[in-house]
Image: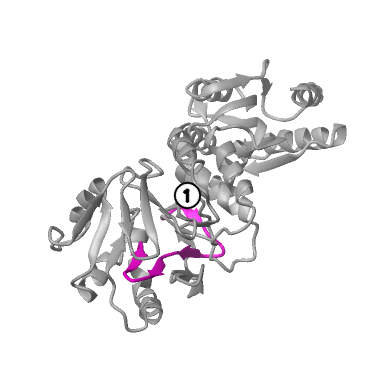
Amino acid sequence: MEHVTEKIINIGVNDSELTLFEGQYAVKHGMAYNSYVILDEKTAVMDTVDEHVTDDWLSGLEQALNGRTLDYLVIQHMEPDHSGSIQDLADRFPDMKIVSSAPAFNMMKQFFEMDLESRMVVIKEGDTLELGEHTLQFYTAPMVHWPEVIVTYEKSEKVVFSADGFGKFGTRDAAEDWTCEARRYYINICGKYGVQVQALLKKLSTLDVSVICPLHGPVLTENLAYYIGKYDIWSRYEPEDRGIFIAYASVYGHTKEAALKLKEMLETRSREKVTICDLCRDDPHEAIEDAFRYDRMVLAAISYDAGVFPAMDDFLRHLKGKNFQKRTVAIIENGSWGPTAGKAMKALLGEMKDITVIEPMITIKSAVKPETMAKLGELADVLLKS
């Protein structure tokens, strides 16, 4: 239990045992499921938590209420990691009203078997809820990153309850950089919906905000312009940093050798930031994060089944799904008899927006030879001038 202000308390649960979020994202420092209690003439809880931590959450809620009843539950997002305890809470407080958007109530009926009609408070854009000294004003945020999402502004203390926005991987007490894990979280989970995030940022720009309370990660209380600025860059799909990301998929090591030689050349010839990823072994979601972070990317892969090696194919399809765009890309293909990887990678890049492919691509036939090294040197020069 952590006080955000005197009357607003975070009763969320730090789940340090979780290792895989949403069944796919590695979280070495677990995950925070935040939920907030507002204590006023009327009491309100902002969202619940994942059902597997319900008991810990209810214990924190009981402590925060200190004998009081609960008047309102506000549901901003129906994803199960935030709505998983609705049924338990509704059973515990039979007179509690549930406040949410119409699409959220439709989902609620799909998730739970409960009488909602007598306790529903359906809100729309701009509606308010008076708790006493605190007033909640609601803003719709469809597709950030589900269609039912609302974001709530508490007027008296200037607090934004931002649903999944401004969240990050890791527990609240994890000793790690916010930007790195917030970037990986945003791009992999919300990255597809940049237009919708921009619409939400436009709404937030009209508010006087002192605190941002996300459903994951720490409460943000200082230098809010920094966090909002990051979301603005990410949701406009602009490169965050100047640098070169090399992603390779190799089987017997020759394509890997070419990728490493290129990295060495780039670092020898400049002070540019260069990062590299083995798509067959490294975290694929960190690879997606780095692809979005930097302004230039190099793809190196072998030919496989008259196409490109599956790890590279999967990586590029993930990028397309997240609306990857506005980047410069170089291609290195390898094939012992009929190189096809370059054509396959170009075709996938061609389905994305504003991608500039550096020509010509480099073709390796089996192993790295002196002529390959010469071409890699030429490519390094082109990349550094891009």
- The answer to whether residue 198 is seen in the rendering is yes
Asked if 344 appears above or below 170 in the picture, the reply is above
Asked if 314 appears above or below 177 in the picture, the reply is above
Membership of 39 in magenta stretch: yes
- The answer to whether residue 249 is seen in the rendering is no
Instruction: Estimate how packed mark 1 is, as few (under 14), some (14 to 19) or many (20 or more) residues with alpha carbons within 10 Å.
Output: many
Q: Along the horizontal axis of the image, is 35 left or right of 187?
A: left
Membership of 257 in magenta stretch: no
x, y (%) of residue 182? 56, 51
When asked about the image quadrant of residue 312, the answer is: top right
Most extreme residue toward the top is: 360
Q: Residue at x 51, y 46 (%)?
A: 186
Circle 1 residue? 165
SS for tag 1?
loop
Q: Along the horizontal axis of the image, is 223 left or right of 1?
A: right
Q: Along the horizontal axis of the image, is 302 left or right of 81?
A: right
x, y (%) of residue 370? 82, 25
Question: Which range of residues does the magenta coloring cover?
Answer: 23-50
Most extreme residue toward the front is: 133
Quarter of the C terminus within the rendering = top right
Most extreme residue toward the bottom is: 67
Q: Residue at x 36, y 78 (%)?
A: 65
x, y (%) of residue 142? 35, 41
Q: Residue at x 54, y 61 (%)?
A: 219
Q: Along the horizontal axis of the image, is 259 left or right of 110?
A: right
Q: Residue at x 13, y 62 (%)?
A: 115
x, y (%) of residue 83? 31, 60
- Amino acid on which the number 1 mark rests in the picture: Gly
